[in-house]
Image: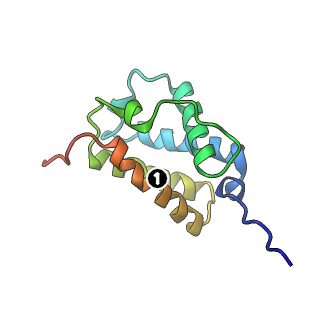
């Protein structure tokens, strides 16, 4: 008897519709955060959200193909510190929880996101 293949995280959280809802909530949270909102003042938000859905869709085992720049190139020169990355990660975790994603899947997703800090963070932590 063969084992049933494990469902992808993408499928487990509800597919594209769920990702769109999570990304919308994520950016609502980010834009409400005084530490982060300044990074997005001149950003085409619909385009950014679309790229984010693509990125997560691909990263979580969905059928999407991410067509944006590399994480390093997309975030170069923005002055992102570890505190900014941590704040976005916290908002992502909260947006996933708000969408009803189970804690074990949130943990898996956060473990996939954490290594991206090496490509996104470009400045040392602020000291005050």
Secondary element at tag 1? helix
Graded by Cα atoms within 10 Å as few (under 14), some (14 to 19) or many (20 or more), the crowding at tag 1 reads some
Residue nearest the viewer, comparing 59 with 126: 59
Name the outermost residue toward the bottom. 1
Query: In the rendered image, which quarter is residue 23 located in?
Result: top right
Give the answer, above or below, for where 23 lies relative to 12.
above
Which residue is depicted at the point 40% across and 20% down? 42
Which residue is depicted at the point 30% across and 31% down? 78
Residue nearest the viewer, comparing 41 with 47: 47
Query: In the rendered image, which quarter is residue 38 located in?
Result: top left
Name the outermost residue toward the front. 1
Q: Position of residue 27 (x, y in %)?
A: 49, 39
Q: Position of residue 1 (x, y in %)?
A: 86, 79
Give the answer, above or below, for where 18 lies relative to 75.
below
Determine whether, in the image, residue 53 is placed left or right of residue 63: left
* Residue with the mark numbered 1: 113
Name the outermost residue toward the right. 1
Name the outermost residue toward the left. 127
Give the answer, above or below, for where 7 lies relative to 54.
below
Which residue is depicted at the point 67% across and 52% down? 10
**Is any part of residue 90 visible from this angle?**
no
Query: In the rendered image, which quarter is residue 24 located in?
Result: top right
Q: Position of residue 95 (x, y in %)?
A: 53, 51
**Is any part of residue 75 visible from this angle?**
yes
Q: Position of residue 101 (x, y in %)?
A: 62, 60
């Amino acid at each position: 008897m063969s084992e049933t293949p494990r469902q992808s995280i993408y499928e487990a959280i509800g597919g594209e519709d769920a990702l769109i809802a999570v990304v919308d909530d994520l950016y609502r949270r980010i834009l409400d955060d005084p530490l982060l909102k300044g990074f997005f003042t001149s950003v085409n938000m619909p385009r950014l959200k679309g790229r984010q859905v693509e990125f997560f869709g691909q990263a979580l085992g969905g059928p999407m193909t991410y067509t944006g720049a590399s994480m390093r190139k997309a975030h170069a020169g923005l002055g992102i510190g570890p505190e900014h990355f941590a704040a976005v990660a916290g908002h992502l975790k909260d947006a996933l929880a708000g969408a009803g994603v189970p804690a074990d899947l949130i943990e898996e997703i956060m473990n996939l996101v954490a290594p991206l800090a090496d490509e996104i963070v470009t400045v040392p932590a602020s000291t005050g």
